[in-house]
Image: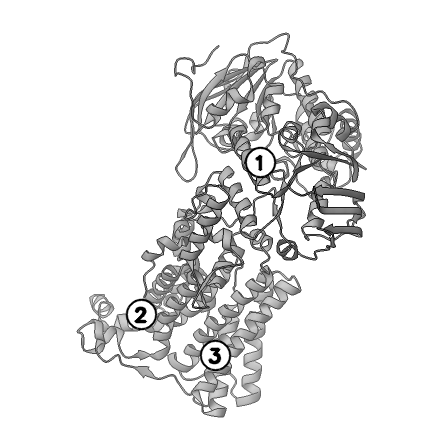
């Protein structure tokens, strides 16, 4: 097979001195699916940004079909037949599918006017040619995320892309949607397209890729045919040591219920029902996992549990106190911790220091302050202790928290929340966007909290995480609990999928609360 | 009071509403097009003032209406582009840059007024004005005729501009790009669109609209230039466009709502009420209307006019 893209001895150093790519060399063969795997910050996305002309390398050579290639902006890469599907989809939400596809190369009528009909027609033709079904005259905002992603792929194909780069495309998809994407990619490969697939989900890499390049700490560790690698093998090369992907053992002792939700109903600001008749209990010493496609009421439910959103009706009991109308501070004082899904928005104040972010929930304790001053020495000592105990990689507690990597910011949040000695831990997407090393470490912290008798309520879009950690699992769809699995150890992702998509639901009788 | 009601429901009143709305419709369209590209333009106040001044001076010295028009529009484009240069190239905050532009406009026009005409507050010389225009068939229709016919030609241009705005926004590639840039600049960038350039074009077009509004003020509404004669219309335009969801017909309605209030104020001032109080009515109305509007939209920004962006649904966006 021909080499379509060859990267030789590429160096990329960011202005702040971060070395993102160190002497990287990769050959990508035409008509294959080539996975680039690595932890967050390993440099895989940066490498592809260089190829796509979003950023430029310091030194090194790229050649495309044997000719030197150094795009200074994305349009040059597009013209050379490269398409990129970004992690965050690049679509205008209030334009139609067809308009998004032709944007930048619009068909014209009379030389001046935008020809909407031709746009719809060509979008339809492209969609049929590549057998990627999309409703071309619908608005992007009306479409589910899997379909939006297909629009992104079509956008690239419409511009005659021969080489498609997909940056973590499955991060937002359900298992079923992921499978559909993979069928699409297989099909595109058969049509002669080359696909570069960036991921840190090893199962998927194993399923889809012909060749795997493993990156760690800005360097290429190895490139091998996928058939010669096992999932454990890739993980080991990625992290540099052995990784445990198996499920955690069930808890030895489960105590009485610490968090009980009964008949909870919530309405979103736009009048849509967000949470409907939701009831469940979480006992001390267990992890209740919530599976579901994002946007099916999990966010609202979590925010109600910690007092950030009002409820319409129903009870939320912590111990025997109804917290449904209490403030977040009062709820915290009752022993509820919150690991929020958006750490930069709700978890930390990005421009403040690590120590300030750590004491934000406890600065009023006599150890840390009186009414007019803060004892910074004690704060510092406390923070240093947490940085050590939670293995946070940080220069100094006085550094701005946003100078840390995503995984380490999340560890700061988790350190604060778990060290508050809670009875109930509400964890929403606790490992979103963190690398596999931090993933594993955060999991061990959550399991440890469970083993100390805390009730853990876990919401995650990462099914591997839900399956790995949960004692019991509930599935949410359109604001309702549509399935309950009392023993998570026998459940698979395939079991959960149909419920997550609303294709199946358990009978109402079994969907009642089990004490 | 009954005489007031009588005079408000008169043909003259509605004729006046159209007249008073004209210098709001133009800048509101300017606000709308920049808003569509993702920027808030509060600089139309200054752009209008400069164009109003430029038009008067050029018309006095050249005695050519056409040259006055061209010079005014050119000044609008220039200062729209200047705003773009400060914001897009030099990365200044667009609100700050626009505030600076407004102060510059106010000071510069007064300074030049004194230097050129010697007048301290108003231009001593009479400006040329745009002609009024009777629409042949329309004028003979009872009630509607006297309301719609006989306006200054710029009033008709204003209504035509609403239609032009609609065509540019929804029927040209530039409009599509402006909307894409406003909704998701990264999406536009990812397909090779020069986002800053599109935003600059939007600002320059908004300068054209603003200039037309300013020209009408000094060369139609009245026939002279006086200091700070725009009197907040550039800001009321922001409210009008926002209420109209930055869509063509909505922006027109928003502008006319404020035009209606302003006209009513003129009528009310004939009553025995302190004039300072009466003059505060339009601004009070702006506050009240915006309060009602934003209370209704307090829900996290989920565009109410969303589906109207859909070209298929544009049919309810009627021609004016």
Mark 1 = which residue?
A: A186
According to the image, label 3 marks what residue?
B52
Q: Is residue A233 left or right of residue A446?
A: right
Q: Give the residue at x 68% y 53%.
A: A53
* N-terminal label among 2 and 3: 2
Residue A245 in the image: state x and y as whole percent.
68, 21
Report the residue marked by disc 2. B17
* Separation (CA) of disc 3 from disc 1: 64 Å
**Residue at screen point 46% across, 19% down:** A483
- Residue at left offset 69%, top offset 17%: A448
Q: Is residue A265 above or below residue B214?
A: above
Q: Position of residue B282 (x, y in %)?
A: 39, 64
- Where does the image place residue B212, in percent across and percent down from the top left? 44, 75
B82 relative to A505 in the view: left or right:
right
- Identify whether A215 is placed above or below A76: above
Above or below residue B64? Residue A143 is: above
Disc 3 secondary structure class: helix
Q: Chain of mark 3?
A: B
**Circles 1 and 2 in contact, beta carbons < 8 Å:** no
């Amino acid at each position: 097979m021909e080499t379509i893209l060859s990267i030789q001895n590429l160096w990329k150093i960011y202005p702040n001195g971060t070395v993102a790519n160190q002497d990287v060399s990769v050959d990508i063969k035409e008509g294959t699916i080539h996975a680039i795997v690595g932890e967050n910050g390993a440099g895989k996305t940066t490498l592809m940004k260089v190829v796509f002309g979003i950023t430029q390398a310091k030194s090194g050579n790229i050649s495309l079909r044997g000719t030197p290639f150094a795009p200074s902006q994305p349009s040059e890469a597009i013209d050379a037949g490269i398409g990129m599907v970004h992690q965050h989809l690049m679509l205008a939400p209030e334009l139609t599918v067809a308009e998004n596809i032709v944007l930048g190369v619009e068909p014209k009528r009379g030389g001046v006017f935008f020809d909407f009909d031709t746009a719809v027609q060509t979008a339809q033709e492209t969609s049929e040619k590549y057998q990627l079904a999309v409703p071309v005259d619908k608005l992007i905002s009306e479409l589910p995320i899997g379909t939006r992603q297909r629009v992104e792929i079509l956008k690239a194909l419409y511009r005659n892309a021969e080489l498609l780069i997909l940056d973590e495309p499955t991060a937002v998809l359900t298992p079923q949607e992921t499978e559909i994407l993979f069928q699409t990619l297989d099909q595109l490969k058969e049509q002669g397209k080359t696909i570069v697939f960036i991921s840190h989900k090893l199962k998927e890499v194993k399923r889809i890729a012909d060749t795997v390049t493993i990156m760690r700490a800005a360097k290429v560790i190895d490139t091998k045919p996928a058939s010669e690698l096992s999932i454990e093998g890739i993980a080991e090369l990625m992290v540099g040591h052995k990784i445990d992907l198996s499920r955690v053992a069930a808890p030895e002792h489960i105590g009485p219920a610490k968090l009980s939700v009964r008949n909870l109903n919530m309405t979103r600001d736009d009048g849509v029902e967000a949470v409907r008749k939701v009831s469940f209990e979480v006992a001390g010493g267990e992890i209740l996992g919530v599976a579901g496609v994002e946007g099916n009421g999990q966010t609202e439910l979590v925010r109600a549990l910690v007092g950030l959103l009002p409820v319409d009706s129903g009870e939320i009991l912590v111990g025997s106190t109804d917290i449904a109308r209490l403030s977040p501070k009062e709820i915290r004082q009752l022993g509820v911790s919150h690991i929020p899904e958006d750490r930069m928005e709700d978890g930390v104040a990005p421009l403040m220091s690590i120590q300030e972010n750590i004491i934000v929930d406890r600065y009023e304790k006599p150890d840390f302050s009186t009414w007019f001053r803060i004892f910074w020495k004690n704060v510092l000592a406390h923070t240093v202790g947490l940085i050590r105990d939670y293995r946070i990689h940080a220069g100094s507690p006085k550094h701005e928290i946003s100078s840390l990597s995503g995984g380490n910011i999340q560890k700061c949040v988790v350190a604060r929340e778990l060290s508050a000695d809670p009875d109930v831990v509400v964890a929403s997407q606790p490992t979103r966007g963190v690398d596999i090393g931090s993933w594993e470490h955060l999991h061990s912290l959550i399991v440890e909290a469970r083993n100390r008798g805390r009730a853990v309520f876990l919401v995650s879009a990462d099914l591997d995480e839900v399956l790995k950690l949960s004692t019991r699992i509930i599935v949410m769809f359109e604001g309702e609990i549509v399935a309950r699995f009392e023993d998570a150890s026998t459940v698979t992702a395939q079991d959960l999928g149909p419920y997550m998509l609303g294709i199946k639901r358990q009978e109402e009788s079994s969907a009642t609360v089990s004490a | 009071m009954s005489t007031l009601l009588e005079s408000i429901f008169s043909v003259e009143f509605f004729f006046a509403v159209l007249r008073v709305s004209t210098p709001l419709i133009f800048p509101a369209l300017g606000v709308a097009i920049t808003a569509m590209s993702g920027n808030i333009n509060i600089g139309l106040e200054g752009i209008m003032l400069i164009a109003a001044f430029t038009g008067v001076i050029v018309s006095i010295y050249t005695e050519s209406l056409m040259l006055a028009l061209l010079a005014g529009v050119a000044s609008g484009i220039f200062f729209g582009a200047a705003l773009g240069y400060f914001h897009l190239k030099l990365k200044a905050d667009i609100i700050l840059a626009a505030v600076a532009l407004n102060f510059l406009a106010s000071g510069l026009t007064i300074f030049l007024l004194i230097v050129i005409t010697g007048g301290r507050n108003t231009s001593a010389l009479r400006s040329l004005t745009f002609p009024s225009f009777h629409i042949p068939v329309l004028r003979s229709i009872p009630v509607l005729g006297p309301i719609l016919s006989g306006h200054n030609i710029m009033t008709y241009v204003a209504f035509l501009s609403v239609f032009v705005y609609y065509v540019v926004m929804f029927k040209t590639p530039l409009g599509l790009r402006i909307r894409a840039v406003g909704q998701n600049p990264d999406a536009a960038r990812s397909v090779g669109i020069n986002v800053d350039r599109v935003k600059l074009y939007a600002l320059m077009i908004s300068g054209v609209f603003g200039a037309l509004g300013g020209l009408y003020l000094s060369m139609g509404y009245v026939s002279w230039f006086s200091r700070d004669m725009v009197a907040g219309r550039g800001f009321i335009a922001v409210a009008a466009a926002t209420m109209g969801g930055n869509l063509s017909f909505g922006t027109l309605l928003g502008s006319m709502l404020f035009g209606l209030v302003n006209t009513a104020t003129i009528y009310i001032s004939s009553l025995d009420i302190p004039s300072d109080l009466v003059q505060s009515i339009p601004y009070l109305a702006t506050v009240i209307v915006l309060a009602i509007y934003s209370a209704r939209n307090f829900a996290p920004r989920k565009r109410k006019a969303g589906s109207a962006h859909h070209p298929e649904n544009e049919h309810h966006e009627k021609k004016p």
